[in-house]
Amino acid sequence: MSTPILYNDFPSFLKRHFPFKVQKISLNAGFTCPNRDGTRGYGGCTYCNNQTFSPEYCHTEKPVTVQLEEGKAFFAHKYPKMKYLAYFQAYTNTYDELEELKRKYETALTVDGVVGLVIGTRPDCMPSTLLDYLTELNRRTFLLIEYGIESTLDRTLLRINRGHTWQTTVEAIERTSARGILTGGHVILGLPGETRADILSQAKEISRLPLDTLKLHQLQLIRGTRMAHEYETDPTDFHLFHYVDEYIDLVIDYIQRLRPNLVLERFVSQSPRELLIAPDWKLKNYEFNHRLQKRMKELGAYQGKLVGNP
């Protein structure tokens, strides 16, 4: 007998929207970020190295159409009839002139087998003119806007050089959801200076937002980042989850404080071994999910169980 899923999972969410298998294909469409080019600041977020989530087919010198075709070829051997979502992932994918953004999004939708878009961005990069266009686009294709939230604490956002406040995040998500557009978020658990109590309190704040989907990732130290240098200089304010079971227990406590109808897409991030400093669990995503569900079953835990608790 299969183990029942004890949280609102992403594959079930996709099945509610599509009658066929769907796979996201990551794209690097050549964008930058306002906290890299001087608009908000320089250097980017202190933890960020975009090489950590760029597949082999995902390079800026290749047009979006080529990246999509190579991505399709990568996945098609497993499911020949699969359809695809073009996932504008690298950097801030709404940070450009409106006409250039339209061109890239519309080009992606012309590729055979692409049935929608997922657009990753920052809360401070969603002007009303773009939101007007995305509202129209949402009427004719699947669309999910994914905001990097990272933390609900302004002191953390300042420390990691995000260049915006928590209130900026709240307003962007509320504006997007109010247009009827599926809205996702991404948070990092274990950012420096945040306690376990801070993290669990974050879950309650996240649940108040009109989000449809949420990704959780553990903090990873990546070579060449400002955060890695910060850790090497003074590690006392960091708590890295060197033991996966400790992180699993935190995730369980976190998702029990999330409202039950929030779709949980991921719980971990995997970075290339040559770039990763710590933690290194040597686990695939599906292996982590299996261990998470096993532990939840042992504890009698499920999403939403502790909503309303401290």
Image: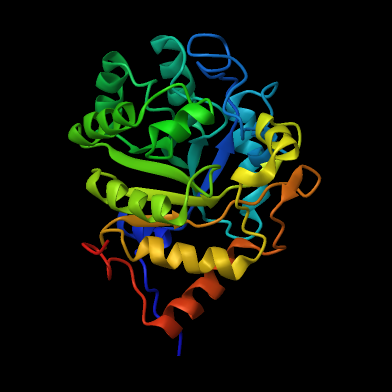
Residue 278: horizontal and vertical position, in percent?
Answer: 71, 51
Of the pair 84 and 204, the residue shown nearer to us: 204
Residue at the extreme bottom: 1
Residue 144: horizontal and vertical position, in percent?
Answer: 36, 39
Q: In this view, does 249 lie above or below 300?
A: above
Can residue 3 be seen in this snapshot?
Answer: no
Q: In this view, does 37 lie above or below 282?
A: above
Q: In which quarter of the view is residue 60 placed?
A: top right
The tally of labels here is: 0
Which colouring convention does the figure follow? Answer: rainbow
Can residue 204 be seen in this snapshot?
Answer: yes
Of the pair 80 and 64, the residue shown nearer to us: 64
Q: Quadrant of the N terminus?
A: bottom left
Q: Is residue 251 above or below residue 143?
A: below
Q: Is residue 38 above or below residue 56?
A: above
Q: Quadrant of the C terminus?
A: bottom left
Of the pair 306 and 131, the residue shown nearer to us: 306
Residue 68 appears left or right of 147 = right
Residue at the extreme left: 178
- For the point 29% across and 47% down, the residue is 205
- For the point 65% across and 63% down, the residue is 284
Of the pair 32 and 246, the residue shown nearer to us: 246
- For the point 45% across and 56% down, the residue is 196
- For the point 58% across and 47% down, the residue is 219
Residue at the extreme right: 274
Q: In which quarter of the view is residue 146 placed?
A: top left
